[in-house]
Image (cartoon, coloured by chain):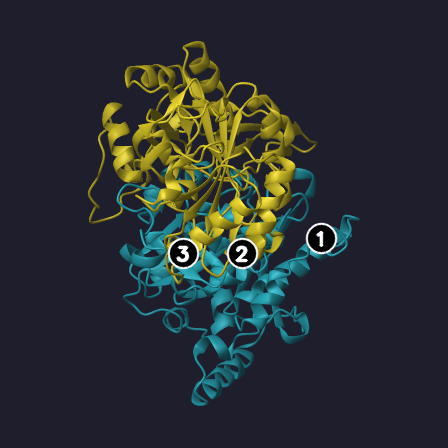
Chain colours: A cyan, B yellow
Amino acid sequence: MSRNSEPSIPAISALRASIDRSRKKGHHGFAMAAARVVIVKAGNLWTSTGAVDPAVITKMFARGFALLTGEKDEPRAVSSLFRPDDRVGIKVNTIGGKALSTGPDVALPLASWLSRNGLQGKNLFIWDRTTRELRDAGYGTSAERSGIKVFGTDADGVGYETGLVSHLGVGSLFSKIQTEFATASVSLAILKDHGLAGVTAGMKNYFGAIHNPNKYHDFHCNPFVAEVFDTPPVKGKHKVSIIDALVVQYHKGPSYHARWAANYGRLIFSLDPVAADSVGWSIIERLRADGGLPTLKEEGREPAYLATAEKMGLGRAGLGSIETVEETVL
Amino acid sequence: MKRRSFIRGAAGAGLVIGTGLPSVCPGLAAVGAKPNLSRVEARYYDKLPDREVECRLCPRLCRLGDKERGYCGVRENIGGTYYTLVYGKACSLNVDPIEKKPFFHVLPGTSALSMAAAGCNVNCKFCQNWEISQVRPEQIDHFDLPPEKAAAQAIETGCPTIAYTYTEPTVFFEYMYDTAVRARRRGVKSVVVTGGHINPEPLADLLAVVDAVKVDLKGFTQEFYTEYVRGELKPVLETIRAVAKSKAWLEIVYLVIPTLNDRMGLIREMAKWVRNEVGDQVPVHFSRFQPMYLVKNLPPTPVSTLEAARETALEEGLRFVYMGNVPGHEGENTFCPGCGKVAVQRVGYRIEAIRLKAGRCDTCGTPIPGVWT
């Protein structure tokens, strides 16, 4: 289901009531809104210089959280997902360099907005595998000015755990950022076509939390994306998927190719990590169709890990079971 | 072992190891990432359109976009050019008895300068060295040891051989190859300890510059390779054939893992294959498994299983069949196929006696194949 008009306050109230009913039934917050995916776009997102307008993207985050949680009050929206003393790790994906990463123009406004709405700034950090990749993606001076900590697992004093997490088909060392530093985790991933996985988005973003992601690209990353997500360090801390679909690489990813990169200008929010990525996949397919490209299935690389994830109970993969709410921020 | 090895090597290279954990995470300006990786163009790859590359080093044939690394984690496409990140970057360096590799028919009683760089192109669930093989190079400490220096260190430490071992040397091919070339010029031999996942072209080039290859034949079914190795059996068998046809000496190790690859019918099949395809003179070692890495739910291999495996291979006509990781067992010794006397007596990695003269049994004169001088 798709709705393009801005939901009225009563609509949010209805959602709130639905959430409350679910909670009364004993469901965890994740479960009650599990199949809801919120897509927020903004017509005036980019400034005349081509930069993302921080005020506009902040509005997009605020709206996304409101629609996701049913809380129009921003601090309440935040507190419905996080404890005030949570140390929140915002896992970005910066392997694609400046042109195709979750950049500081997206991640820093999110961190700032969270810190203004109930979380402590000192407890917020943006992270990825390596500081070099973060730097290459543009996290530098602006990150330092913001006061938000930004660092890679390779930073001094961080590193990987020495104990293996052996779970299903996965055997990995986890970044201490995920295991020790963070008590709650946000996957703030970029939406990309992926030559092996088909699609890389919120779930596969956690490949950056393990020391050996290169070992899990066989068989189109299936079942490994689902299995890494299912590990206790990830599943136990993941709170929300936010997919940066401002620029979407819909072909020849995960590397940047301007020819197949679309200015899509949207953020995707969901408490259901599988649903978020499934909607991301549908967007990639739409852009591919617009570009006259075959579907991922026709290319033999559809993201089968999503169906696996659904079978594992991690969320919903079928678009028919996902409620999509789309809204434009003015 | 690995950490000790590293520390020894690192200390030799003048490195300072160990940092304390900071109480807070500093900002970007203060963090000290020190990847110190090489950027030497890789061999055996094709450039493709759109800055993609296809690696031809191993059977995986990784096809990679810009900024992506192969399955091995140590070769990266940077802007459409493929680079090895571990050239001259040793993560482990040690002086080992050559019996530890194990090579039993190569200069027994000598030491091998044993070196490794990070990475591997399979992911064995029972890997003994996963802390250096199943990581990216920037995740572990390493130090600069260029090929020329490695060759010089072999001489300085009295090692007649350099062993490329611990991890999978295929993935640091360029480093290994160049070291072997320089070592040979200085009269130092090179021996390779490999899982055998390498394509024919680079293998042929490698075999021209090394003296011996030990192939870990990790099982004898594709199912085992799929489930426990994450690789393919067929290319490994092709590698064994190619080494046997070359001038390089070949030995084979089969790690016997309880319930997973220890069926005697399978071992008999493997022994027949060795006899028929590469000959009865090729030494085969049946090594004892110890619970490790992701296979910790199985006990060490019973000695009786190794004995049965050895007996089975001998029944199939293999002449030199050994047991590994069972110190003091007679299965460690080399028996002359002519007179049955012990030609090389071993206890663990220690040589007790060598009864060979110019590669022949001291007792009856039967030739014992190998690299003896």
Task: Locate residue A56 relative to residue B80 in the image: left or right.
Answer: left
**On the same chain: label 2 and label 1?**
no
Nearer to us in this view, B232 or A320: B232
Counting from the top left corner in percent of width and height, residue B230 is at 55, 50
Counting from the top left corner in percent of width and height, residue A31 is at 49, 78
Counting from the top left corner in percent of width and height, residue A208 is at 45, 50
Which residue is found at the position 27% from the left and 43% from the top? B26
Residue to which mark 2 is pinned: B264
Q: Nearer the viewer, mark 2 or mark 1?
A: 2
Quadrant location of the C terminus of chain B in the rendered image: top left
C-alpha span from label 3 to label 2: 12 Å
C-alpha span from label 1 to label 3: 62 Å
Q: Is residue A243 shown to the viewer in this render?
A: no
Looking at the rendered structure, the kind of residue marked 3 is Ser
> What is the secondary structure assignment of the residue under circle 3?
helix
Q: Nearer the viewer, mark 1 or mark 3?
A: 3
Q: Is residue B304 shown to the viewer in this render?
A: yes
Task: Specify the subunit that label 1 lies on.
Answer: A
Which residue is found at the position 55% from the left and 51% from the top? B267
The vertical placement of A91 against A40, above or below, is above
Task: Specify the subunit that label 3 lies on.
Answer: B
**Mark sitting on residue B171:** none
Task: Locate residue B152 relative to residue B51 in the image: left or right.
Answer: left
Residue to which mark 1 is pinned: A287
User: Most extreme residue toward the right, as rendered?
Assistant: A292
**On the same chain: label 3 and label 2?**
yes
Looking at the rendered structure, the kind of residue marked 1 is Leu
Counting from the top left corner in percent of width and height, residue A204 is at 53, 55
Quadrant location of residue A129? top left
Tag 2 and tag 1, C-beta contact below 8 Å = no
Residue to which mark 3 is pinned: B304
Nearer to us in this view, B346 or B301: B346
